[in-house]
Image: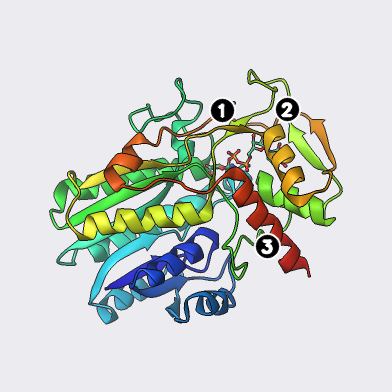
Amino acid sequence: MKIVVTGGLGYIGSHVVVELQNEGFEVVIIDDLSNSSESVLDGIFSITGKRPLFEKIDLRERSRVKSFFKTHNDLKGVIHFAASKAVGESVAKPLHYYENNLHTLNYLLQEMEKMEAAKFIFSSSCTVYGQADELPITEVAPIKPAESPYGNTKQIGEEIIADTCRVSTNFHAIALRYFNPIGAHESVLIGELPIGIPQNLVPFITQTGIGLRDQLSVFGNDYPTEDGTCVRDYIHVLDLAKAHVAALKRLLQGNNTESFEVFNIGTGKGSSVLEVIKAFEEVSEMKLNYAIAERREGDVVAAYADTEKANRVLGWKAELSLKDALKSAWKWEKKVRS
Ligand code: UD1
């Protein structure tokens, strides 16, 4: 069964490609290499022994999207990761984000609407909940006004898909709302490769550990949480990758009960910034240089998933711990810098 993974050379996409290949799917990757490298194909090949087809396409080039779907007329599904994801950059360049994340989605869906049976997995985010009123967060929690153009593209993206599902009987989709993906493949042949200064906590921690950054700033310790630092649900990227395969199989087997379904993908466990630092210090057997700093604008206090729906309906559950994930992130950092 042939599946397209857009953004398949990126951090999450590449782990999903490996998982799909391990499950016997034939994978075609579309990627524009704007935030990834072709060498990721070698990593995937070394892990699975199979080299996925790769087409360098910028999805904004509509004619190329059209011809791609004409060539690959035996496609069974699309898993869509290709998008820009830097929150700060999205505030500075909103039109770029709306074009790159939403025009492209529209072009893909227009081609998929022509397919006999189109199955679509969308990479969404817990950012759609903003600061949720109740924890853990369920899928029926209200969607809050987006904090950034990036967050808005995830909300609007889901709406575009829901509207398409309403009118296209042959089009079925699942949006996975990820919490905080971290870690790397246990082989350390693929992992996260942030460009420039990392915005996310775990790559900043590992880069500080390796000496690339002097000090980690902990953004605020006066939040209304147990130790005053923000709480998040950190999920191992391998568990996250498996959730995509479970969601795809659900659509391919026609087990979905609605044409558009949404699932939270997290561990269900919240960890504070200080807890993550402590866990990192334990797995790396070193002291991390960190200092308390001002709060970061736009940060929510606490977010962690209610995973009951995903566990029950997808038959999927996160199995790896925070320490497992940090261990793999640290091993990856050491390998990348060696
Ligand atoms: C990130 C994304 C958000 C996305 C969400 C879920 C950013 C800015 N936000 O948010 O759009 O929807 O993941 O995938 O990228 N922290 C520090 N020091 C640092 C970096 C982070 O203390 O140098 C803290 C933050 O304040 C936060 C926690 O660590 O409390 C996690 O931060 P981060 O990795 O950026 O994730 P989110 O804020 O959850």
Residue 55 drawn above or below residue 258: below
Secondary structure state at the residue bearing disc 3: helix
User: Which residue is under mark 2?
Assistant: 220
Whichever of labels 3 and 1 marks the residue nearer the N terminus, that label is 1
The answer to whether the residue bearing label 3 lies less than 8 angstroms from the nearest atom of ligand 1 is no
Q: Report whether the residue tagged 1 is closer than 8 Å to ligand 1.
A: no
Does residue 215 appear to the left or right of 36 in the view shown? right
Is 124 on the left or on the right of 287, as rendered? left
- Can you identify the residue that label 1 sits on? 302
* Residue 30 placement: quadrant: bottom left
State the residue at coordinates (60%, 50%). 324
Amino acid marked by disc 2: Gly
Residue 295, how many percent across, how many down?
Answer: 71, 28
Helix, strand or loop at label 2? It is loop
Label 1 packing within 10 angstroms: few (<14), some (14-19), many (20+): many
Q: Residue at x 50, y 32 (%)?
A: 304
Depth check: give the residue in front, 312 or 17: 312
